[in-house]
Image (spheres, rainbow, N blue to C red):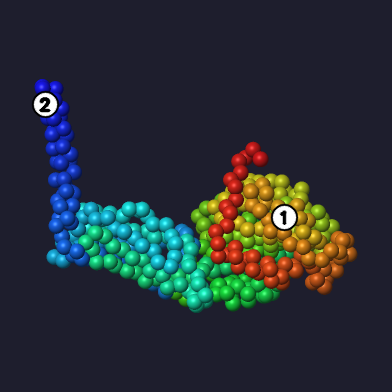
Amino acid sequence: MKGNFRKQLYFVIVFLLLFYVIEIPTDFLKSKIRLLLLPENNIILNMKTYPEDFSLLCPDGSSPIILEVCAYDLNHDPFPFLLIHVELNNFQGKIEPSYPITNKDGKCLIYVYPNSIYITDKSDDNLVEASIKLYSTKSISANYQVRLTSLPILLVHGFQDTSESFVPLKQHLENNGFIVYSIDYSTETDLDTMSTELGDTISLMKTQLKEKGIYTSKIDIVAHSLGGLVSRYYTTEQSYIEKQDVRKLIFINVPHHGTPWAEAGAKLLNSPFLKQLYPTSSLFASTFPNLINKGLNHNIQVANIALENDEVVPLPSTSLNLWNIETKVYRIGAEPLTMESILQSQVYGGSRHRQLLFYKPVFEDILSYLTKDLTYPQKRSNSY
């Protein structure tokens, strides 16, 4: 009997201590009883949202919509320890915290990270009228209306080319509601300089978009040939850790492992930089292997497109198998490769290396890649 009494006394003491530690400072139980006794629709959720100054948001997965919520009863007294339910309409996203609860002052912060939108045939230029609904037990729901649109796209051209090579693809994407930019940069400098130009262009894009009331912290890149190496370099430098401004990389005919024609081409085309694209150059032997994840950022979604009989970049050189990224392979024409054909393609612009930039099935692939989740590169250790 004495043993049972001691156990009961122990539990009573523990309960009183917990009550003293938790209930007296917080009124937790009092608030739950108060909620139980309230009639329906007697709690009001007041909501402020950030950012405030943008008419359009891009669902990049990292830029949050911040909701500052205050719960009150009809006497305007704050309501603590109230579980807030969050419902997303016409878009998907991550919600933090997963189970938001008001503090003792009846307030809580909710972060919603939109990462994709539901685009239908009725969507106007990829503009989606979305909303966030908040509600709780005994509350009147609160709604926040937001307009979302697809991420802007930057097209990055290849060696000795210009943004004009991307005109057909640019028009195709714009006709499907995307905001598309192109970059023109000198390909006769070095990767550091080209990477800096790319970063400056991305910063300028985001500034111009903000001036139009469009907010995004990330963009998607579609890159051809050398443009793909510039994009890889930019997104794997140590300085990129602070920027984090690219969501997807879509590669077209990129010499990820160099090209055997580089040395000969450097002499014939009078381009010293082209020597850096030889497979055994320092770029592939030491530069890329010493960058983030050996030259392909594992936090950026990737798609890879190649041409089987490209006269400039052999198919094995386009592979990203080391990062477990599959390659979509096309074939155009059947003529054998010769140095003469390569030179003619540079002079007259009839290169198969560029034909994928004018090939509608590739346009449809890119459109698909931009509107669905892609594979992230496998993390590579220093041992391979």
The amino acid on which the numbered mark 2 sits, given as a three-letter code, is Phe
Q: Quadrant of residue 85?
A: bottom left
Considering the numbered disc 2 on the image, is that residue within a helix, a strand or a loop?
Answer: helix
Q: Are marks 2 and 1 in contact (CB under 8 Å)?
A: no
Q: Residue at x 77, y 59 (%)?
A: 308
Instruction: Please count the marks in the image.
Output: 2
| Mark 2 neighbour class, 10 Å CA radius: few under 14, some 14 to 19, many 20 or more | few
Q: Nearer the viewer, residue 184 or 3?
A: 3
Residue labelled with disc 1: 318
- Mark 2 → mark 1, Cα distance in angstroms: 78 Å
Residue 213 is situated, as x and y percent measured from the top left of the image, at: 44, 74
Q: Residue at x 52, y 57 (%)?
A: 244
Q: Say left or right for 109 vs 3.
A: right
Residue labelled with disc 2: 5
Q: Say left or right for 62 vs 97.
A: right
Residue 33 is situated, as x and y percent measured from the top left of the image, at: 15, 52
The amino acid on which the numbered mark 1 sits, given as a three-letter code, is Thr
Which quarter of the rendering shows the N terminus?
A: top left
Q: Nearer the viewer, residue 339 or 369?
A: 369
Residue 185 is situated, as x and y percent measured from the top left of the image, at: 66, 67
